[in-house]
């Protein structure tokens, strides 16, 4: 009976790891996120988008941005999105 409990505990921990990897970490979203530009890259590519101390959207020119989590609002992987046209501008992490 103890052996069964051990196996159940190990299986439970394994299931938690799988859950964490695929649902919380999400390798597909992680890859997508890493392909988007960093703020430094954005400023290099869109040097004309710097308006004074603000950064504008390269699509519509809006200087309003939204800070969104990647998989959920509390995600440490952030996407900075144009508030007007919803274009993903750059990525950040907290
Ligand atoms: Zn825009």
Image: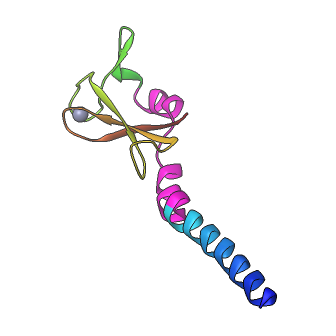
Chief secondary structure of the magenta portion: helix
Residue 6, given in percent of the width and then of the height, sits at 77, 81
The residue positioned farthest toward the top in the image shown:
52
Q: Position of residue 63 (x, y in %)?
A: 27, 21
Residue shown at 23%/26% (left/top)? 61
Which residues make up the magenta segment? Answer: 24-46
Q: Name the foreground residue: 60 vs 3.
A: 3
Q: Can you tell which quarter of the image residue 10 is in? A: bottom right
Q: Is residue 6 left or right of residue 17?
A: right
Residue at the farthest front position: 1
Whether residue 49 is situated above or below residue 2 in the rendered picture: above
- Residue for point 36% across, 8% down: 52
Quarter of the view holding residue 87 = top left
Residue at left offset 64%, top offset 68%: 17
**Quadrant of image for the C terminus:** top right
Q: Quadrant of residue 73?
A: top left
- The number of callouts visible is 0
Quadrant of image for the N terminus: bottom right
Queried whether the magenta region covers residue 44, the answer comes back as: yes
Q: Where is residue 82? Give x, y as percent.
A: 28, 34
Rendering quadrant holding ligand 1: top left
Is 67 colored magenta in this rendering?
Answer: no
Percent x, y of residue 77: 50, 43
């Amino acid at each position: 009976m103890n052996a069964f409990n051990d196996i159940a505990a190990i299986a439970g921990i394994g299931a938690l790891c799988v859950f964490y990897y695929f649902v919380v970490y999400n390798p597909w979203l992680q890859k997508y996120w890493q392909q988007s530009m960093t703020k430094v890259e954005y400023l290099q590519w869109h040097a004309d988008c710097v308006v004074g101390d603000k950064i504008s959207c390269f699509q519509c020119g809006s200087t309003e941005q939204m800070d969104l989590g990647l998989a959920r609002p509390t995600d440490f992987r952030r996407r900075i999105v144009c508030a007007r046209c919803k274009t993903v501008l750059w990525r950040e992490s907290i």
